[in-house]
Amino acid sequence: MNIETDAVIPFCRDRVYRAYRDEITDLVEYLPNVNAIEVREREERADEIQLLNVWHGGGEIPKSLRKFLDEGMLSWNDYATWRESAFSCEWRIETNSFRDAVNCHGENHFIELSGERTRLEIKGEMSVALDRVRGVPRLLAGPLGRTVEQFLVKQITTNLATVSGGITRYLEAEAMRSKGG
C-alpha cells in the first residue's frame, strides 16, 4: 500500500532539511501523535548521515485490532540515510511488534520553491503479512492484514503530515524567538 503526503513549508530548503534531520527531538512538542523521539545512532560520512531514531507514538488502537496489536506497535525504529547533495532522505521503518510481518520504506525529497518555501514530498510503501505472526489464524491473515495495513498507513501518513506541520510551527517559533518575540 502506498504512503504519500506532501506539504509546502514557508522556510528555505536548507533550514527545513536541517531541522528535520538534526533537530527532530526538538519537534516533539509540536507533534500531537508523538510522545518522544530518541536519537539512538548517528553516523556521519562525506555527504551522508545515517540515523537511527526511535519514535514513541500515541493514539488509539481500533477495538477490532486490539487483540492482535499492543502498545508496542506504536513505537518504531526509523532508519534513515540523509543525502545533503540531493536534499533527500531514504528511510525504513521497523516496528517493535511483528517485525517480520511489516515492511515499510520510502523517501523524502526537499524541493526548493520560490519565495523561501520548501515542498516536502514523502513517498513510501508498506505491506503487512500477518501470516508471519504466530497466533493469527491463516484464514484471517489476509483480510486482517489489509485492515492492519490500512490502519498503519493512515497512522504513518498522519504522522508524516503532522511532522511537516510541526516543522513549520517549530521554525515559526524559532523565528519569533530570534526577533525577541
Image (cartoon, rainbow, N blue to C red):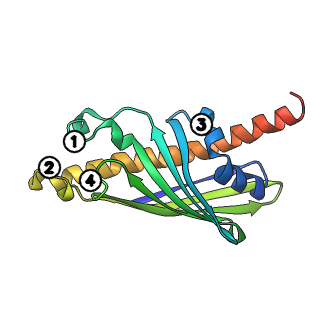
Badge 1: few (under 14), some or many (20 or more) residues near its Cα, within 10 Å? some
Asked if the residues shown at circle 4 and circle 2 are in contact, with their CB atoms under 8 angstroms apart, the answer is no
Q: Disc 1 designates what residue? A: 68
Closer to the chain start, of discs 1 and 3, is 3
Identify the secondary structure beneath mark 3.
helix
Badge 4: few (under 14), some or many (20 or more) residues near its Cα, within 10 Å? some
C-alpha separation, residue under disc 1 versus residue under disc 3: 28 Å
C-alpha separation, residue under disc 4 versus residue under disc 1: 13 Å
Is residue 80 found left or right of 71 in the rendered image? right
Asked if the residues shown at circle 3 and circle 2 are in contact, with their CB atoms under 8 angstroms apart, the answer is no
Q: Disc 3 designates what residue? A: 28
Identify the secondary structure beneath mark 1.
loop
Closer to the chain start, of discs 3 and 4, is 3
Identify the secondary structure beneath mark 4.
helix
Identify the secondary structure beneath mark 2.
loop
Residue drawn where x is 27% and y is 57% of the image:
101
Asked if the residues shown at circle 2 and circle 1 are in contact, with their CB atoms under 8 angstroms apart, the answer is yes
Badge 3: few (under 14), some or many (20 or more) residues near its Cα, within 10 Å? some
C-alpha separation, residue under disc 3 versus residue under disc 4: 30 Å
Asked if the residues shown at circle 4 and circle 1 are in contact, with their CB atoms under 8 angstroms apart, the answer is no
Is residue 172 found left or right of 107 in the rendered image? right
**Quarter of the image with the C terminus in it:** top right
Q: Disc 2 designates what residue? A: 136
Closer to the chain start, of discs 2 and 1, is 1
Residue 11 in the image: x percent, y percent? 77, 50
Q: Amino acid at mark 4?
A: Arg
Q: Disc 4 designates what residue? A: 146
Closer to the chain start, of discs 3 and 2, is 3
